């Protein structure tokens, strides 16, 4: 097992529970990557539009992906309950519309979820009701999903790791996988031999698997957290306690934390590093949503790499004989990464039907090669930023 995020820890847990001898290698620390740095939103489905999956793998395959990805939310709930993971689980998610066309798309999306997928936990929230729930005049309307949620992502990841250890998995931090071949993972200090190898390093996997790296691009996402606001002031911002994200291409997302802060994520960048110079820019975005927080101090700021695929669909499959991988969650990984770990465990045990549906989704390399693909993506994202503004 390579990678100590949600997907790797989930795979380790599910394989150990099936009786496999499991060794997990993590280059840094458990949860060091995107799993521990995200906004913590627990979402149904996948990041790409369902119409994209219809085109890529047909309606039946698309529906199978939907069913499995939506079951991922229930799996997350179940893992937290079964292993008593203290991670500040809070029910509720809202997708907020800023523009008239967003509102139209939102209504159509809710109708599709209900009629095509029998997903009845969503409802439309008109503007007058939304303003009693969300203390911002930036949004026209929203979709509320009672099945969605949010949590403390690092605490959840660490809880999965502890559960995997209790089940018998061995976890090795500060251990970098330098070379991967069928049946063998070479590290800087030795090697691990295994009948099955699972790669869950995503944007942090590095040069150990260049064929996988070509299918994703690491994008630095940035998050800030305010000083504690107090229970009353925090509750006044988001009365129902839900996580919120908007419908812009370059979106803002935010939620209350258990210690009554506001956690807010927004801008993204395309450099390889995660040094964050846009703390002030993120705060400016926060104040566009909640200008009443102008007097509030930003106490924490951090960044981390998420892994985007060109089509925003998840990228699962087999790199080599006996070498499984899961990557490309494209910002939708809290629930889906846990499910990816379970699907890999099923596939290793010979029950690969659900895993293979995801593996059928085709993915192309990002254009431009290692040198030009980041500038090309930055130009493309500039177009989408301008479209958001206009």
Image (cartoon, helix red, strand yellow):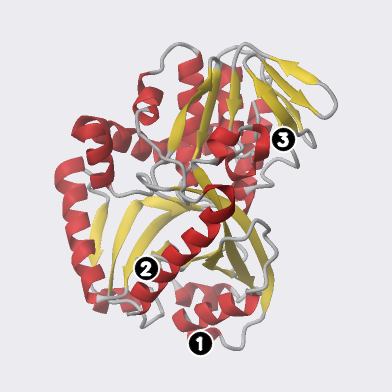
Residue at numbered disc 2: 248
Secondary structure beneath disc 3? Answer: loop
For the question of whether residue 162 can be seen, the reply is yes
200 w.r.t. 228: above or below: above
Residue 204 in the image, given as x and y percentages of width and height:
64, 43
Residue 51 in the image, given as x and y percentages of width and height:
23, 46
x 38%, y 49%: residue: 47
How packed is label 3: few (under 14 Cα within 10 Å), some, or many (20 or more)? many
Position of 343 with respect to 199 (left or right) is: left
Secondary structure beneath disc 1? Answer: helix
> Of marks 1 and 2, which one's residue comes earlier in the chain?
2
Position of 386 with respect to 10 (left or right) is: left
Residue at numbered disc 3: 26
Secondary structure beneath disc 2? Answer: loop
How packed is label 1: few (under 14 Cα within 10 Å), some, or many (20 or more)? few
Instruction: Look at the numbered discs 1 and 3 and tell me whether their residues touch, using CB distance below 8 Å.
Output: no
Q: CA distance from mark 1 to mark 3?
A: 42 Å
Instruction: Look at the numbered discs 3 and 2 and tell me whether their residues touch, using CB distance below 8 Å.
Output: no
> Of marks 1 and 3, which one's residue comes earlier in the chain?
3
The image quadrant that residue 129 belongs to is bottom left
Image quadrant containing the N terminus? top right
Residue at numbered disc 1: 292
The image quadrant that residue 140 belongs to is bottom left
Marking on residue 184: none
How packed is label 2: few (under 14 Cα within 10 Å), some, or many (20 or more)? some
């Amino acid at each position: 097992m390579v990678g100590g995020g949600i997907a790797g820890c989930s795979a380790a847990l599910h394989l150990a529970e099936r009786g496999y001898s499991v060794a997990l290698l993590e280059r840094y620390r458990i949860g060091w990557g995107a799993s521990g740095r995200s906004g913590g939103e627990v979402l149904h489905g996948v990041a790409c539009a369902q119409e994209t999956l219809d085109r890529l793998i047909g309606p039946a395959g698309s529906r199978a992906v939907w069913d499995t990805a939506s079951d991922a939310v229930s799996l997350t709930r179940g893992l937290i309950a079964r292993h008593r993971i203290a991670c500040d689980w809070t029910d509720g998610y809202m997708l907020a519309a800023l523009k008239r066309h967003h509102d139209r798309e939102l209504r159509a999306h809710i109708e599709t979820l209900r009629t095509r997928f029998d997903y009845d936990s969503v409802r439309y929230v008109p503007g007058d009701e939304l303003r009693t729930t969300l203390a911002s005049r930036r949004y026209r309307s929203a979709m509320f999903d009672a099945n969605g949620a949010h949590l403390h992502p690092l605490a959840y990841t660490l809880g999965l790791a502890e559960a995997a250890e209790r089940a018998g998995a061995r976890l090795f931090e500060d251990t970098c996988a330098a070379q991967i071949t069928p049946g063998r993972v070479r590290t800087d200090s030795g090697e691990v031999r295994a009948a099955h190898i699972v790669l869950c390093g995503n944007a942090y996997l590095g040069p150990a698997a260049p064929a996988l790296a070509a299918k994703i691009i690491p994008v630095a996402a940035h998050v800030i957290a305010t000083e504690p606001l107090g229970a009353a002031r925090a509750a006044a911002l988001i009365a129902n306690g839900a996580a919120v994200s908007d419908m812009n291409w370059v979106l803002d997302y935010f939620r209350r934390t258990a210690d009554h802060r506001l956690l807010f994520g927004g801008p993204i960048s395309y450099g390889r590093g995660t040094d964050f110079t846009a703390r002030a820019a993120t705060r400016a975005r926060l104040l566009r949503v909640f200008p009443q927080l102008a007097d509030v101090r930003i106490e924490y700021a951090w960044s981390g790499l998420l892994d985007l695929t060109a089509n925003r669909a998840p990228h699962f499959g087999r790199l080599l004989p006996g070498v499984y991988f899961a990557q490309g969650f494209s910002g939708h990984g809290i629930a889906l990464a846990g499910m990816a770990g379970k699907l890999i465990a099923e596939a290793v045990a010979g029950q690969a039907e659900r895993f293979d549906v995801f593996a059928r989704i085709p993915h192309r390399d990002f254009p431009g090669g290692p040198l030009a693909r980041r500038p090309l993506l930055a130009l493309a994202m500039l177009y989408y930023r301008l479209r958001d503004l206009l």
